[in-house]
């Protein structure tokens, strides 16, 4: 069992499964390996467990690329752990590689083949693969789907692999009626803020998958999901809120923003949605593209959607080319499930209540299942007023009261009742009148008094 509430994926039980392991070359300690890629990684819970290297295991090494480059760590596929799902009788949800990133470049394609083969052999379980590296995921899954439908040899190889993993030649027959992408495999990306959402979600939507989800945990900023869900209202987002990658020339930025002007009821969200609906590759995808003028050779570079089936490609020299790309997709892909949560741990960053509420309301309007995992270390506190001169009392969602004993930006609280440790609070953290936040041990899962534990229906 795992304490990660959403890992059940709508089934009675949820577990984690970590077949990708690592060994500290100097000490021999076994644990895991990962490498930080974005702000969400700053206070990684998995890294903290791995560094401890105590009874729970761990290499004792932080999640830094230098350890792999220097040869401090040996990464391997744990064959014993790999086979665990084959022995689980009762259906369960499985969070795959919860201690690492399954699509990190240190994970070999042949290891992924073996992991996907096990998942194919366990149709009663549901597997969730979560990554911050969706381009690798898209590349692997697209090539796998193409091979599945076009190459008899690839299918034969997978059938042979099934026989090897199970020790039974009869297991190969399970692939005869197997669909690809696998219907029991859910693919997701972490998107802690708007820039990461705009960077990663388009790659997820371009990846063949039976179910697609986004984990917005830790939530570090407000996110407009309208390009990626069936939004029923027009987005208020403006171009001033969009972060252009540094490699996109200003002339291309201007062309796109002029066409998708906010005062024409457009804007960045409509532009991103248009790219998806026209089957264009995600922003920055490197490839070879057809220029608009017939007869000219393909041009290679990074792609930027413009409008309709027209795009721009920026080559290595920085030159801009007008290209035609993509095709209309039917049905258009959308996100099937959204997870939201604040950050936990001693150095946790607060999540603004308005961010979580907005995300909940966007999902509700689009009828997208919403799972609120936690507030993290910070929760909403309501000021009750002065009880005596120089003191205030604050009420928490669980009904406990705390007394302020020293004022200032960093306020120390003491519990009004015994049994709860003192904590610290930042009052008016955002200075926008949206209430006060208190730092506690674990702030709970209630959002405006309600627990949100919604799952999508399996297909």
Image (cartoon, rainbow, N blue to C red):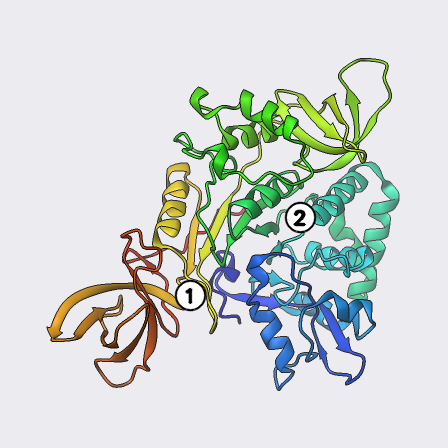
Residue at (79%, 32%) from the top-left corner?
Answer: 315
Q: Earlier in the sequence, mark 2 or mark 1?
A: 2
Q: Which mark is residue 302?
A: none
- At x 82%, y 71%, the residue is 70
Where is residue 10 drawn, in percent x and y? 48, 56
Label 2: how many residues lie within 10 Å, few (<14), some (14-19) or many (20+)? many
Q: Is residue 271 above or below residue 15?
A: above
Residue 210 in view (yes/no): no
Give the vertical position of 103 relative to 273 (above or below). below
On screen, residue 422 versus residue 399, left or right, reads right
- Residue 186 image position (x, y, % from top left): 60, 50
268 with respect to 108 (left or right) = left
Residue receiving disc 2: 134
Percent from the top left, x then y, of residue 247? 69, 38
**92, 133: nearer the viewer:** 133
> In the rendered image, is residue 37 in sight?
yes
- State which quadrant residue 304 falls in: top right
Q: Work out whether 274 lies above or below 456.
A: above
Q: Is disc 2 placed on a helix, strand or loop?
A: helix
User: Which residue is depicted at the point 77% across and 85% down?
Assistant: 27
- Residue tagged by mark 1? 376
| Residue 234 in which image quadrant | top left
For this orientation, the residue located farthest to the left is 388
On-image quarter of the C terminus:
top right
Q: Nearer the viewer, residue 174 or 195?
A: 195
Other-residue count near label 1 (Cα within 10 Å), few / some / many at <14 / 14–19 / ≥20: many
The residue closer to the viewer here, 172 or 131, is 131
């Amino acid at each position: 069992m795992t304490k990660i509430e959403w890992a059940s994926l709508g089934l009675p039980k949820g577990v984690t499964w970590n077949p990708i392991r690592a060994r500290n070359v100097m000490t021999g300690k076994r644990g895991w390996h990962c490498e930080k890629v974005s702000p969400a990684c700053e206070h990684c819970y998995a890294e903290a467990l791995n560094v401890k290297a105590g009874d729970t295991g761990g290499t004792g090494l932080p999640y830094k690329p230098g350890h792999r480059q220097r040869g401090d760590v040996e990464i391997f596929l744990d064959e014993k752990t790999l086979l665990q799902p084959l022995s689980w009788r009762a259906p369960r949800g499985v969070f795959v590689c919860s201690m690492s990133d399954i699509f990190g470049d240190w994970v070999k394609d042949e290891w992924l083949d073996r992991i996907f083969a096990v998942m194919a052999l366990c149709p009663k379980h549901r597997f969730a693969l979560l990554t911050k590296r969706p381009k690798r995921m898209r590349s692997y899954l697209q090539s796998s789907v193409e091979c599945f439908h076009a190459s008899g040899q690839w299918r034969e190889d997978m059938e042979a692999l099934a026989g090897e993993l199970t020790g039974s030649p009869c297991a190969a027959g399970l692939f005869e009626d197997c669909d690809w992408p696998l219907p029991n495999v859910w693919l997701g990306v972490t998107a802690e803020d708007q820039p990461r959402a705009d960077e990663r979600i388009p790659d997820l939507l371009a990846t063949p998958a039976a179910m697609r989800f986004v984990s917005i945990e830790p939530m570090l900023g407000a996110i407009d999901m309208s390009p990626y869900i069936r939004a029923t209202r027009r987005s208020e987002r403006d171009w001033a809120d969009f972060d252009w990658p540094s490699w996109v020339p200003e002339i291309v930025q201007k062309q796109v923003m002029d066409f998708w002007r906010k005062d024409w009821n457009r804007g960045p969200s409509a532009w991103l949605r248009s790219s998806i609906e026209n089957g264009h590759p995600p922003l920055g995808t490197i490839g070879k593209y057809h220029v608009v003028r017939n007869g000219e050779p393909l041009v290679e570079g990074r792609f930027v959607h413009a409008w309709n089936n027209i795009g721009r490609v920026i080559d290595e020299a920085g030159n801009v080319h007008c290209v035609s790309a993509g095709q209309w997709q039917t049905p258009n892909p959308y996100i099937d499930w959204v997870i939201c949560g604040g950050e936990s741990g001693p150095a946790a960053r607060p999540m603004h209540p308005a961010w979580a509420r907005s995300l909940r309301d966007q999902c509700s309007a689009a009828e997208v299942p919403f799972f609120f995992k936690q507030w993290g270390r910070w929760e909403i506190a309501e000021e009750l007023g002065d009880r005596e001169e120089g003191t205030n009392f604050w009420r928490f969602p669980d009904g406990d009261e705390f007394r302020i004993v020293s004022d200032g930006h960093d306020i120390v609280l003491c519990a009004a009742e015994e049994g709860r440790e003192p904590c610290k609070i930042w009052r008016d953290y955002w200075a926008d009148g949206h209430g006060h936040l208190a730092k506690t041990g674990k702030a709970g899962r209630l959002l405006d008094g309600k627990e949100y534990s919604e799952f999508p229906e399996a297909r």
